[in-house]
Amino acid sequence: MAGIYIHIPFCKTKCHYCDFYKSTDFASRPDFLSALKIEIQSRTNELSDEKIESIYFGGGTPSVLKVSEISAILDQIFNNYPVAEDVEITMECNPDDLSAAFLSELRKSPVNRLSIGTQSFNDQDLKSMNRRHNGNQAITAVKLAQESGFSNISIDLIYGLPNQMLEQWKLNVEQAIQLNVSHISAYHLTYHEGTVFYDYLKTGKIKELPDELSFDQFKLLKAALENAGFEHYEISNFAKSGLYSRHNRAYWQRKSYLGFGPSAHSFDLKTRRWNVSSLRKYLQAFELNTPYWENEILTEQDKYNDYVITSLRTIWGISDQYLEDHFQGRFHDHFKQEAKKFIASHHLAFDDGSYKLNREGLFISDKIMEQLLYVED
């Protein structure tokens, strides 16, 4: 089984934390949609007839498109790829785009899962991030989606924001639980180079939240959501009743996927490919019939490092048997040697044949992964 990702590069405004490729110029929208359909049709031989179990509209802001445009993209996929009958089709949405009329029309399309970018229910947080909606709009958007018949809904939250106190974060988490959604993604703020927040940090306009407070926010999040019936199945993701994101699970469990649109990535277990992160260059390539992507063939070291990074993030962890079967010799030896240190410090556990992060390890996962990766001297 495989997945498809579609990158919609348009945003009405740019958020201060976001480093994904996007454009606020909508003039090229018709040309983009035409080029996207050509790309979808031209790459049908890349998945070896694997059935598509997940389709994901990300961005950017997919909800700036008309429902008819979303449906036309899906028609192109269904007409060119073998799609599973129970395919999960997710669309990322901004709360201020979700009117009752839009949702009613979207419900008639094949889209069956929404990922709503609430980020926070606190107006101060939202203003600092340059989000277009307020807290009440975020709540209303989720309720309207539920009333329209969408039952599989995910919402996003961000913690570790500058000046975000523990009580503020607690109210955010409590509000998220009250909305009775099936999935919550909660990310700690990262200061990506090229973003407004990064510039603010470097010039002293804002300060990073102390690690202790960030860790307290993480512990509060984990405890509250697990008490509310969510399973913490990946570092930043929580789901009810096993309703994991199929799209993200494909990344973590090393399944093949195709990425369409500017900046989208693809993976076939042996090769990685990425489209140019420029709408202008993407469109120009179709006009001139020139390449709009680059790719690399993965080495054994790349494959080992990919497996460690993706698998350790999840509740399923790193399989000792998989390591023995696929990475004998220096990779397996390196992993065993480094893993012992984190087992001794109680950041890693070896359980049921797999290495898994415990609660303390989850919060310093980047440091642990860095040590477990194999890097040539």
Image (tube, grey):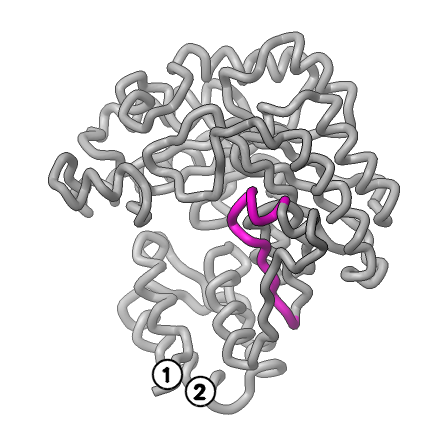
Q: Residue at x 25, y 45 (%)?
A: 215
Specify whether residue 365 is in view. Answer: yes
- Tell me the element at label 1: helix
Looking at the rendered structure, the kind of residue marked 2 is: Asp
Q: What residue is pinned by disc 2? A: 333
Q: Position of residue 154 (x, y in %)?
A: 55, 31
Q: Position of residue 18 (x, y in %)?
A: 39, 39
Specify whether residue 246 is in view. Answer: no
Q: Quadrant of the N terminus?
A: bottom right
> Is residue 292 shown above or below 113?
below
Of residues 262 and 166, which is closer to you in this image?
262
Instruction: Indicate yes or no whether the magenta region holds residue 274.
Output: yes
Q: Residue at x 38, y 23 (%)?
A: 131
Q: In the image, 337: left or right of 197?
A: right
- Tell me the element at label 2: helix
* Displayed quadrant of residue 169: top left
> Which segment did they paint magenta?
270-283
* Displayed quadrant of residue 213: top left
Give the number of the disc on residue 337: 1
State the CA–CA distance, disc 1 to disc 2: 6 Å
Q: Position of residue 224 (x, y in %)?
A: 38, 32
Looking at the rendered structure, the kind of residue marked 1 is: Gln
Q: Quadrant of the C terminus?
A: bottom left
User: Badge 2, how many Cα within 10 Å: few under 14, some, many 20+?
Assistant: some
